[in-house]
Image (cartoon, rainbow, N blue to C red):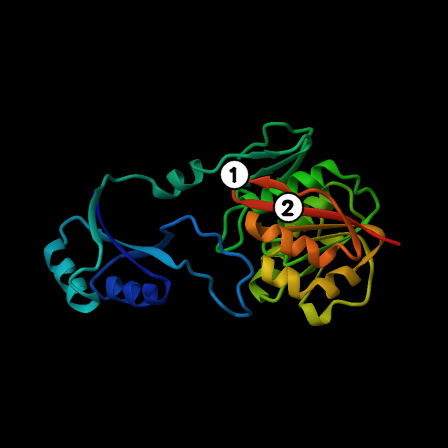
């Protein structure tokens, strides 16, 4: 049967309230979407990431009284709350969602493939990774910049640190591309769970270890990747630099173009920093540790 979808554009702080209202009015499901293409990177411990501008959509059966629903929402949320009512044809929505994700190449060797898709090149380095809450599958520029760097690097037998690992995409790519040992660090337990699960799916769990930041043992790696945000990258500079051995490689992302100079300056006393590489509004910085 057809369905009715009621969409409410709101702020991240009110998204939970709107969700509760829609469910209370009889929605059979509620979804939250980003209204303005805002990346979600490195949430605080235990936090559920949410966008500043969020569209909350409630799915209702076709015979629902939409005038009553809209009146109730406006009464609770304000007369000027942005609302939109849409009729949806009956579809296999799970199949529709799955069909929207395609394998993506990064560089010359590496592909990221949803688990239900056949890799286009069976001889390539194929990572199986499904879309999941908050943690990305390589489509955002910050992650893509790091994946392309990994694809171009010689990682055979090397030790790698993925600081702020999220879903583990960078760590798993490093392992698939030949890294001997990868240390994954994140302050969110959900991220560490996702990393373990994805590592097992890609049969590299024996080469990955996951840690909260305070539990990481002393080490110096040949490669450190940190795809977080400019502020944490600046404040964590002593910690991250200490995790890289002399002549080791540092790769930083999650940096906007106008933030690149400040981040690079923070590291240039200890690293020979390369020119920034950009993708859209985002920058990747890389360098080799002096000494």
Q: Is 208 placed left or right of 37 in the picture?
A: right
> Which residue corresponds to the image point at 68% horizontal and 68% vertical from the top-left?
213
Residue 212 picture location, percent across and down:
67, 68
Q: Nearer the viewer, residue 119 or 7?
A: 7
> Which residue corresponds to the image point at 83% horizontal and 59% vertical from the top-left?
220
Q: Nearer the viewer, residue 240 or 91?
A: 240
Residue 53 picture location, percent across and down:
36, 56
Q: In the image, is residue 281 above or below residue 236?
A: above
> Which residue corresponds to the image point at 75% horizontal and 54% vertical from the top-left?
268
Residue 102 picture location, percent across and down:
50, 34
Which quadrant of the figure has residue 146?
top right
Q: Are marks 1 and 2 in contact (CB under 8 Å)?
A: no
Q: Nearer the viewer, residue 172 or 61?
A: 172
> Which residue corresponds to the image point at 80% horizontal and 57% vertical from the top-left?
270
Q: Is 76 placed left or right of 67 in the picture?
A: right
**Residue 46 in view (yes/no):** yes
Neighbor class of circle 2 (other Cα within 10 Å; few <14, some 14-19, many 20+) is many
Please tell me the numbered disc located at residue 72.
none
**Residue 65 in view (yes/no):** no
**Would you name the residue on which mark 2 appears?**
284
The quarter of the rendered structure image containing the C terminus is: bottom right
**Would you name the residue on which mark 1 appears?**
116
Judged from this view, the residue extending furthest toward the bottom is 214
The quarter of the rendered structure image containing the N terminus is: top left
Neighbor class of circle 1 (other Cα within 10 Å; few <14, some 14-19, many 20+) is few
> Label 2's element?
strand
């Amino acid at each position: 049967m057809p369905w009715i979808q009621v969409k409410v554009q709101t702020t991240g702080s009110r998204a939970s309230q709107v969700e509760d209202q829609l469910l209370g009015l009889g929605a059979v499901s509620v979804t939250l979407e980003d209204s303005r293409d805002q990346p979600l990177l490195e949430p605080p411990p235990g936090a559920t990431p949410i966008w500043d501008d969020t569209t909350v959509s409630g799915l209702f059966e076709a015979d629902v009284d939409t005038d009553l629903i809209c009146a109730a929402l406006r009464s609770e949320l304000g007369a000027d709350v942005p609302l939109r009512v849409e009729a949806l044809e009956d579809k296999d929505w799970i199949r529709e969602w799955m069909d929207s994700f395609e394998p993506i190449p990064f560089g010359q060797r590496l592909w990221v493939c949803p688990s239900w898709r056949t890799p286009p090149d069976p001889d390539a380095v194929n990572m199986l990774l499904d879309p999941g809450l908050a943690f990305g599958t390589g489509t955002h520029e910050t992650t893509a910049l790091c994946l392309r760097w990994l694809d171009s690097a010689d990682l055979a037998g090397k030790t790698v640190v993925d600081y702020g690992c999220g879903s583990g995409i960078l760590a798993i790519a490093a392992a698939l591309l030949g890294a001997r040992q990868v240390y994954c660090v994140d302050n969110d337990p959900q991220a560490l769970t996702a990393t373990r699960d994805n590592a097992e799916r890609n049969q590299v769990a024996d080469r990955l270890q996951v840690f909260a930041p305070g539990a990481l043992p002393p080490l110096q790696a040949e490669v450190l990747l940190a795809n977080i945000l400019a502020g944490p990258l600046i404040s964590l500079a002593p910690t991250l630099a200490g995790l890289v051995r002399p002549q080791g490689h540092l790769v930083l992302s999650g940096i906007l173009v106008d933030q690149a100079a400040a981040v690079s300056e923070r590291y240039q006393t200890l690293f020979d920093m390369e020119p920034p590489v950009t993708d859209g509004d985002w920058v990747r910085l890389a360098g080799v540790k002096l000494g």
